[in-house]
Image (cartoon, rainbow, N blue to C red):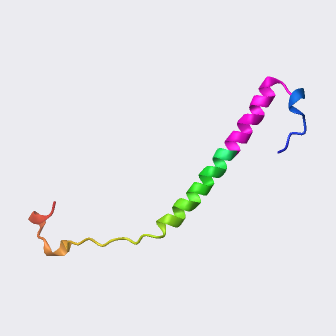
C-alpha cells in the first residue's frame, strides 16, 4: 500500500512505521526467495542407501 503523504507532513512515529513496513516487506521477500532456492537445492540430491545390509546382522550385532 502506497502512502501518498509527503514525509514532511508525517509525524516521526508515522515515518518510523512506514520505514518498518518497508523493511519487513523486504525481509519477507528475501525469506520467500531463499526458501524457493532451498527447495531447488533439495531436489538436486538423492537419498543414499546404507552401505550396510542390515538384514545380514543378527540382533546382537545391531547397535
Magenta stretch secondary structure, dominant: helix
Which quadrant is home to the N terminus? top right
28 sits to left or right of 52 = right
The stretch of residues the image draws in magenta is 10-25
* Quarter occupied by residue 45: bottom left
* Quarter occupied by residue 35: bottom right
Q: Which residue is situated farthest in the top direction here?
A: 12
Q: Which residue is situated farthest in the left direction here?
A: 60
Verify whether residue 16 appears in magenta. Answer: yes
Q: Can you give x and y, in whole percent of width and height, for residue 15 in the image?
A: 79, 30
Verify whether residue 35 appears in magenta. Answer: no
34 sits to left or right of 44 = right
Q: Which residue is situated farthest in the front direction here?
A: 8
Q: Can you give x and y, in whole percent of width and height, for residue 55 in the image?
A: 18, 74
38 sits to left or right of 49 = right
Q: Is residue 32 above or below residue 17?
A: below
| Residue drawn 90% across the image and 35% down it | 5
Q: Is residue 22 above or below residue 8?
A: below
Q: Is residue 43 above or below residue 2?
A: below
| Residue drawn 19% across the image and 71% down it | 54
Number of marks in picture: 0
Q: Can you give x and y, in whole percent of width and height, for residue 12 in the image?
A: 79, 24
- Camera-side residue of 30 and 60: 30
- Camera-side residue of 54 and 42: 42
* Quarter occupied by residue 34: bottom right
Q: Can you give x and y, in whole percent of width and height, for residue 22 in the image?
A: 73, 41
Amino acid at each position: 500500500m502506497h502512502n501518498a503523504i509527503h514525509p514532511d507532513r508525517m509525524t516521526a512515529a508515522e515515518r518510523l512505521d512506514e520505514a518498518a513496513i518497508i523493511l519487513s516487506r523486504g525481509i519477507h521477500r528475501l525469506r520467500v526467495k531463499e526458501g524457493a532456492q532451498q527447495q531447488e537445492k533439495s531436489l538436486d540430491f538423492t537419498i543414499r542407501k546404507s552401505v550396510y545390509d542390515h538384514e545380514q546382522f543378527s540382533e546382537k550385532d545391531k547397535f
